[in-house]
């Protein structure tokens, strides 16, 4: 145990050697982060609105409002979205930040999750942002920015995109990892899922694959969820044993035979 | 209308900045110390702790009501660190695939003491060791901060001790 006693000393030593930058630097960083979020959400949603219009049967723009239940039967939301000022959200009258109702994903402050309306004055792009529900849910329009502005995401959910995630503790950057829209060959978002493992296990696999296990030293430590993308299958990245994130993915077909999958897919 | 809405927000923002600044002054070094030992990199530790404080600013009105706001910052910092590590892992794999050798950082003197204990241990083990043994957090709190079951914390600690003991034996031979 003496080695572990040394750990506390090591932490103390490292702390003593630390010089904190002036606090205004942190404030500047926070402001820059907010600006990136706004800009990222605007760009991502505008791009995807364009893509959605192009992919629509018959082309042309379409409504952002859900016409009915999704193919999975999920209603878009049980609670109305409200603007940050408390008014009910009206797509025709953008109001800036939107409060997303609390979800069921265990995030302690899910109720304060916000997405920003790209139609907010001063930003370019789209006219509306749709409805959604925090947690494991179906979004109709999702607009998030990822960390450091590199993982800008957001998509028009027609057909809807089912997104399950594990949020950061800060709970404002949406799914962690590199959440990307999964598109079918026709460019239509595919129902999928995303979470911490999305970045590590993401992509298309041969259609005969029915199961992927994560194997570590001969032991199965998790399984990956597959979603059907029509002509292809996609790995959703949901690891059923989330505390065991390591392991080599091994794919099987319906007969239990191993199937080669792209390295790192 | 906008001006009317903005006016009450400014005192709140100033109060938040004051509250976060106080927490920052009191805990920054300690947090960086813990993250440095857990991650093995002072630069990474400083980066994620600063980012965690930046994320705290707009949430201060909520977090200040928690029993331990420092724990919130620490949790965010650890998760940011884990996320960065995963990205780096993916990037390294991609670089290897295209035949580019990744950059190797020179030794960081600040990590040497800790490395003697933690060297070669998986990141998950290092995290629980630092939180439990260095910071003295109870198992339940370690589990809560890392969002893993208590049983997983125990098993990681057990495996980490075994690995460290095996290496210790090697060193003393």
Image (cartoon, coloured by chain):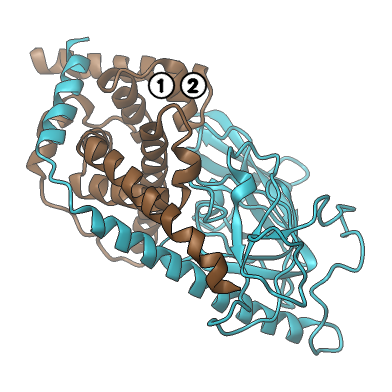
The cyan-coloured chain is labelled: A
Question: Who is closer to the viewer here, A4 or A258?
Answer: A4
Which of the labelled discs sits on residue B152, or is there none?
Answer: 2
| Residue A169 shows up from this direction | no
- A225 left or right of A263 in image: right
Residue B34 position in % (x across, y down): 25, 33
Please provide percent x and percent y for residue A240. Answer: 63, 35
In the image, residue B64 lies at what x, y percent?
A: 44, 37
The colour with which the image depicts chain B is brown
Label 2 resides on the chain identified as B
B5 shown above or below B138: below
Camera sees residue A11:
yes
Q: Chain of mark 1?
A: B
Q: Secondary structure at mark 2?
A: helix
| Figure quadrant of residue A86 | bottom right
Contact, mark 2 vs mark 1 (Cβ under 8 Å)? yes
Choose between B13 and A258: the one closer to the eye: B13
> Which residue matches tag 1?
B156
Return the mark for residue B100. Answer: none
Q: Quadrant of residue A83?
A: bottom right
Quarter of the image that includes the C terminus of chain A: bottom right
Image-based side of A55 in relation to B130, left or right: right
User: Which residue shows up at 38% across the image and 56% down it?
Assistant: B93
Which residue is situated farthest in the right direction here?
A68
Task: Answer with left or right where residue A221 lies relative to residue A31.
Answer: right
> Is A18 located above or below residue A87 in the figure?
above
Instruction: Determine whether the residue tagged by mark 1 lies in a helix, strand or loop.
Output: helix
Q: Position of residue A207 (x, y in %)?
A: 73, 59
Between marks 2 and 1, how big is the CA–CA gap?
6 Å
């Amino acid at each position: 145990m003496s080695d572990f006693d040394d750990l506390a000393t090591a932490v103390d030593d490292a702390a003593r050697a630390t010089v904190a930058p002036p606090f205004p630097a942190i404030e500047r960083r926070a402001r820059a982060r907010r600006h990136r979020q706004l800009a990222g959400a605007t760009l991502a949603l505008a791009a995807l609105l364009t893509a959605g219009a192009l992919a629509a049967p018959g082309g042309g723009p379409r409504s952002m409002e859900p016409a009915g239940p999704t193919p999975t039967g999920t209603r878009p939301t049980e609670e109305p979205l409200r603007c940050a000022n408390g008014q009910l959200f009206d797509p025709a009258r953008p109001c800036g930040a939107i409060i997303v109702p609390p979800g069921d994903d265990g995030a302690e402050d899910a109720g304060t999750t916000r997405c920003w309306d790209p139609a907010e004055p001063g930003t370019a792009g789209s006219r509306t942002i749709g409805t959604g529900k925090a947690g494991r849910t179906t979004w109709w329009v999702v607009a998030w920015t990822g960390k450091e502005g590199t993982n800008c995401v957001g998509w028009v959910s027609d057909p809807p995109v089912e997104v399950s995630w594990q949020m950061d503790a800060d709970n404002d950057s949406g799914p962690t990892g590199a959440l990307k829209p999964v598109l079918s060959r026709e460019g239509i978002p595919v129902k999928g899922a995303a979470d911490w493992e999305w970045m590590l296990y993401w992509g298309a696999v041969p259609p005969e694959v029915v199961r992927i296990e994560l194997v570590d030293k001969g032991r199965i430590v998790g399984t990956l969820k597959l979603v059907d993308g029509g002509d292809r299958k996609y790995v959703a990245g949901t690891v059923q044993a989330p505390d065991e994130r390591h392991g080599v993915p091994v794919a099987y077909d319906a007969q239990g035979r191993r199937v080669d999958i792209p390295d790192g897919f | 209308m906008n001006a009317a809405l903005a006016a009450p927000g400014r005192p709140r923002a100033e109060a938040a900045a004051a509250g976060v600044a106080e927490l920052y002054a009191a805990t920054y070094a300690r947090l960086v110390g813990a993250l440095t030992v857990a991650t093995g990199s002072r630069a990474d530790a400083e980066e994620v702790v600063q980012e965690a404080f930046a994320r705290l600013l707009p949430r201060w009105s909520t977090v200040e009501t928690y029993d331990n706001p420092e724990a919130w910052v620490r949790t965010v910092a650890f998760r940011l660190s884990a996320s960065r590590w995963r990205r780096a892992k993916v990037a390294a794999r991609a670089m290897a695939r295209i035949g580019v050798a990744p950059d190797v950082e020179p030794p960081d003197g600040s990590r040497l003491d800790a490395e003697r204990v933690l060297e070669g241990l998986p990141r998950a083990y290092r995290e629980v060791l630092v939180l439990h043994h260095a910071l003295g957090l109870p198992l339940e709190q370690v589990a809560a901060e890392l969002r893993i079951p208590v049983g997983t914390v125990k098993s990681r600690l057990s495996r980490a001790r075994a690995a460290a003991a095996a290496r210790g034996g090697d060193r003393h031979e």
